[in-house]
Amino acid sequence: MIRDSLLISLLSLIDDPDKIVREAVWSKLKEMGEDAVAEMEALIPQLSERINLNFLHSIIKELKLEHTLKKIKNYLLNPDPLLLDGLLLVTSAIRPDTDKVKYITIIQDIADDMLTEISDKRTAVENLEIFNYIFYKRVGFKHVDESVTKVDNAIITDVLETKMGNIFTIPLCYFLLARYTGLPVYPVIVGRSFTPAYLDNSDEILFFINIFKEGLIFSENERDANISPRVGLDKALVSIYADHLNYLFKAAEDNERVQIMGKVLECFGNERYIN
């Protein structure tokens, strides 16, 4: 009750004409943590007569974004963070109520199916062929929207549900499932793009993978030999995902989401992997 009273008092001052008061209130609301946001939502009926509801919803939305940005920064400080965690955090910036458990379950169920057939006793090529068959044929992941214009094919959570994605999100699903099955498939950064590759125990490239041709294996000789490649970390994939969403929202002139993605990309610094 004391906490509710404090929240009501703070929110009543959030639009105070004094800038110093507004800044102090905002700082205190952020300091109270993520749980306070849920409590604020529960207090909306009590606050409806004191504060404009649209304004209140915008404050709650902005607070959720602040907490998500903080999580992204903490994620990037981790030397070996999980790929799915990063992708879901970026998605949460534009969809604050993203259900993390739901999408972990989707990935885990598919990976469990793959792991019934993938084995240490098989060669790398054999295991990848099994992986590809399940990914493309049994589960049905499919490339659509090559021009990257449709939101449904660009947001990773939608793609995990529909199995239809674009030139960025289908590879991300491929990498995600590789992580959960233990296959050493990583992005090899070449210039401003990346190519999936299968690594050996020494992190050397065994072969490359064409995800756009149902996981077709090809050799380094078939890649541009004039550009020096480097193996990218999963953080690079999360950055690519954020960049690709930023590109999509700019093309769609979705200014609100462009501003959100701008704040997300600030967390990653200056390094970019796509144009």
Image: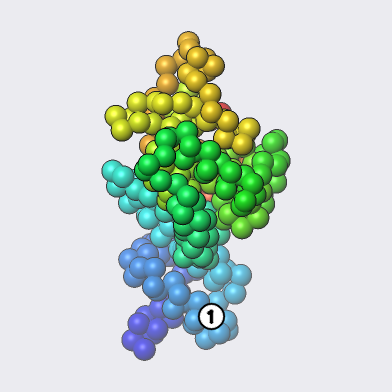
Q: Position of residue 260 (x, y in %)?
A: 53, 50
Kindly identify the residue that appears in the image at 46 percent across and 15 percent down: 227
Residue at image x 43%, y 57%? 68
Q: Nearer the viewer, residue 24 or 185?
A: 185
Q: Amino acid at mark 1?
A: Ile
Q: Tell whether 132 sits left or right of 89.
A: right
Residue at the extreme bottom of the image, as rendered: 1
Residue 227 visible in image:
yes
As drawn, 8 above or below 154: below
Q: Is residue 38 left or right of residue 153?
A: left
Q: At which x and y percent is residue 192?
A: 51, 25
- The percent position of residue 185, horizontal first and vertical second, equals 43, 37
The residue lying at 35 percent from left, 82 percent from top is: 3
Residue 234 visible, this angle: no
Q: Which quadrant holds the C terminus?
A: top right
Q: Is residue 216 above or below residue 250?
A: above
Q: Which residue is mark 1?
A: 44
When asked about the image quadrant of residue 233, the answer is: top left
The x and y percentages for residue 106 are 53, 60
| Residue at the farthest top position | 226
The residue closer to the viewer here, 171 or 216, is 216
Does 11 sit above or below residue 84?
below
Between 172 and 253, the one lying in front of the other is 172
In percent of the image, x 57 and y 81: which residue is there? 48
Q: Which of the 4 quarters of the picture holds residue 53?
A: bottom right
Determine the secondary structure under disc 1.
Answer: helix
